[in-house]
Image (cartoon, grey):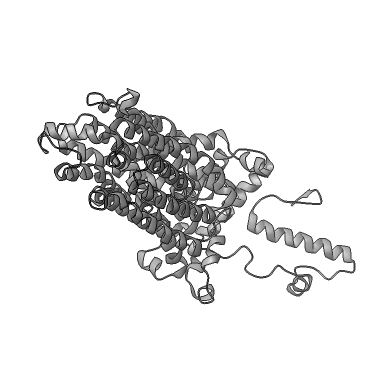
Amino acid sequence: MRRRRYRQITWRLMLSVISATLGASFQFGFSTGFVNNMEMFLLHYFQTQGIVPSDALPQDDAFRFWWSLAVSAFAFGGMLGTCVFPALADRIGRKETILSTSIFSYLACYFMAFPRSWFDLILGRVLVGIGAGGACGAVPSYVTEIAPNELRGTLGTVHQLMITLGILVSQTLLTSKLHLLGNDQLWHYSLLVPASCTTFLLFTLPFCADSPPFLLRTKGEEAAKEALSWFRPGDYQTKRRMYRELRHMYHEMELADRATLWEVFSDELLWKPMLVGIVVNLSMQFSGIDAVFFYSTSVFLSAGIGLQNAQFCTTLIGLCNVLVTIPAMMFMDLFGRKTIQSCGLGGMCVSYVIMTVGLVFNLHFVSVTAMLMIICFFALGPGCIAWFIIAELVPMHARCIAISMALGVNWCASWFISFIFPHLLAYLKKWTFATFAASTFVLACYTHVFLPETKGKTVLEVRETFYTPSTKTNSPALHSLGEPLFPEPMPTLVNLLAEGDVPIVQSTNEVASSMSHTLVHRLREVEDIPLELDGAML
């Protein structure tokens, strides 16, 4: 069964996934990890610019403000990106939207690599954040919409894998102990890496097909069939699965105009799954992971670990993040989203408690081990699921609004955590991570109660979990999603005779044969694929 599932991965499908994620998701990860080991380099840069005193230290209030501003500018740009790109993806397509993020990536690399003033550096962080905000909406949607239904979770996790790879590469290049680019003179050259990945995107993604659901909605059935055939060329059985996917897309979109904000909030079958998706996105940030990715070096320094060792520990965290994300890709479709998310948040809660104990009692080995545990549990659950869960919960006609709101909340929370954490660390000191232990506990409970399992299900099947007796008959979303495959019970022999579909005949065999042909033709109306009955093509 598992071998047959992975046989659906073709080289064209993988080229599309790798092109989109390496060219766009990698930028997000690189920019996230870029500032962690840059604290001392930025301190020296701000001193040369005259905006902090020449004798300022990392723990001084003057530098702490500028440091948190440089870090959080990325999240501010992400908020701007989520306001524009999801709507753009609905208009011009997922592929074209991903390509458009490359403009911001190139501009950001230029301003940060050759800053004429502190303003250029902050502007570069905002610009790369805008591109990352667009990538976080368009890339997961594109990947999940081109992936076979059985592989949505596995391929959807590639987005997070590339983010973790970007974090690791940036941290490795800027670790002083490794003698690569981690000094005041060479750190600018590290930005050639994301620029090269953006170039790879521009040379590969234009030759890939766009999202079949988007093409079905904008250009019709033939364009969607052509895209599906491009991603998954194969034998007869492959085409049967492909046409079945197309039929599910058709039923999801049939009679569905793009939903307005009022329609979303007035319909239980839309706002309930959207609310769950927003909380899942919130759990990603209020799990405290940005505090780890942005400030782990500062945390280790405050715990009494030397600068070079603190940077090296941060790089180990990035390596651990990548290594754990790889098996998470397989676990996603094996154990399901709900189990993975609940266990991930619960494990982070326990790890934060252990880390607080290690910091309070100056047990450096315990603190570093607990932070590695936090990364492992995050990579297994919250780090992967938040990016594509909206596409699995919300129907396509309301997906643009849902993605905009979920990612907007995600980036707002990221900005809040990244800006406030240095000040929180200054006042709570060794008890800072106890706040995240409390938040992850609450979020784990919410996930266990409210998040439905979406593994291997279509949006039409997932919506069943949000039904109540009133919404089954009164909700307008039922009509906008199209009718179910069989709106009435399967026909029986008596019903068929009464309707005149089967003639009154003397032979029982003739009745059975005529009834079988009628049922097969009913199925053909649903599947629109060639079927065989007793070896004869119908």
Q: Examine the rendered structure and indicate whether residue 341 appears above or below residue 47.
A: below
Query: In this figure, what is the number of numbered marks?
Result: 0
Residue 391 % position (x, y): 47, 53
Seen from the viewer's position, the closer of residues 333 and 64 is 64
Identify the residue shown where x is 27% and y is 42%.
Answer: 302
Identify the residue shown where x is 48% and y is 49%.
Answer: 381
Identify the residue shown where x is 73% and y is 73%.
Answer: 499
Mark yes or no: residue 181 visible.
Answer: yes
Mark yes or no: residue 79 visible.
Answer: no
Identify the residue shown where x is 12% and y is 31%.
Answer: 48
The N terminus - image quarter? top right
Seen from the viewer's position, the closer of residues 257 and 413 is 413
Residue 375 % position (x, y): 43, 44
Is 64 on the left or on the right of 283, as rendered?
left
Residue 12 % position (x, y): 53, 35
Is 199 on the left or on the right of 466, as rendered?
left
Location of residue 402 (image quadrant): bottom left
Which residue appears farthest toward the front when viewing the image?
361
Seen from the viewer's position, the closer of residues 526 and 506 is 526
Seen from the viewer's position, the closer of residues 67 and 152 is 67
Residue 82 % position (x, y): 32, 51
